[in-house]
Image: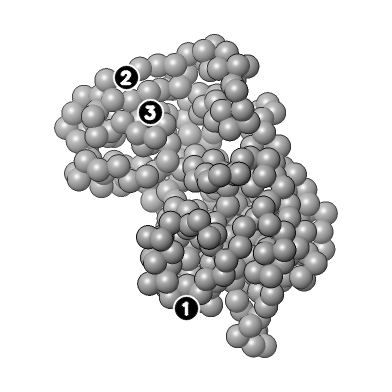
Amino acid sequence: MKNSAAESRILVVGATGFLGMEICRQLMAANKIVTGLVRKTSSEEKVKALKQLGVQLIEGDLKDRTSVKKALQGIAIVISTASSTFSRQEGDSIQTVDNDGQTNLAEEAIAARVQQFIYISFPSMPGEFPLQDAKRRVENKLLASKMTFTILQPTFFAEAWLSPAVGFDFPNAKATIYGEGKNKISWIAIQDVAAFAVGSVDNPATKNKIFELGGPEALSPLEVVTLFEKAGGKKFELQHVPVEALQAQKNTAPDDLGKSFVSLMLVYAAGNEISMQQTLKAIPVTLSSVNDLAKRVMQVNQPVY
């Protein structure tokens, strides 16, 4: 039971991102009191969209610890999706945002005695790379604290990894496949990741728990291509990038972001299957399939990410 409206306030960090925006939408649909952390330099269009949803806004930046402390005043629950991987502005990097910025947020949330911290991470993956190092550091900070936490570890976002941004150019029936494309991945829809975050709010079954998240079925990249071909009635032209070439790219990557993306491509090549049976008992969500995505985007032939 909540004692006051202030206690139920939820701060969404990364509110202007694809996932953060969807989390805000679902929270507002559930009649929650939501504040979105936005930056001075945030897109006017995205800020307007948050306002139209009814989200309260507070200005701040994970790189500015004072602004983080101010944003946490009166907040009961934090949901943090912020990352420098897809949405970057000047001064943003894995070190400044995913590592130092998220650590700032976690430490200030602990000091503010936030009731629950919901952190969007990703499953433990083979090898070391900067983005994984940052995620694990923040997770360890939460694990060592006395603050109630929920760590969500979604695998590959379908809308991101099955998009032209990373070589899955479905509007032009072309796809870059990392590795042989035969190993299965439990692709997950962004709206489902948001649903798990929203379903974790004030949920006793998620208290101090870590959940790996995937979709309803694991499919290899080649199986995904077949679904898109059927949905669009077009044969895809495929280009394979061998694992050896990816390893070479990782070794010569000029920065942390490049090294991290190639590392994720290597995980893509190796496959990433996740069983959802136990998680769905704790957080019931109706999962969206890759086939649903294929039918939707091939009909309109427009990118979704």
Quick check: 28 above or below 256?
below
In-image side of 88 versus 295 (left or right): right
Q: Secondary structure at mark 3?
A: loop
Residue drawn where x is 58% and y is 32% of the image: 257
Alpha-carbon span between mark 3 and mark 1: 38 Å
Tag 1 near tag 2, CB within 8 Å = no
Residue that mark 3 sits on: 167
Residue that mark 2 sits on: 238
Residue 219 lies in quadrant: top left
Q: Earlier in the sequence, mark 3 or mark 2?
A: 3
Residue 123 lies in quadrant: top right
Residue drawn where x is 20% and y is 45% of the image: 300
How many residues crowd around disc 2 within 10 Å: few (fewer than 14), some, or many (20 or more)?
A: some
Residue that mark 1 sits on: 31
Label 1 is placed on what type of residue? Asn
Quadrant of the rendering where the C terminus is positioned? top left
Q: Earlier in the sequence, mark 3 or mark 1?
A: 1
Res 19 seen here: no
How many residues crowd around disc 1 within 10 Å: few (fewer than 14), some, or many (20 or more)?
A: few
Label 2 is placed on what type of residue? Leu
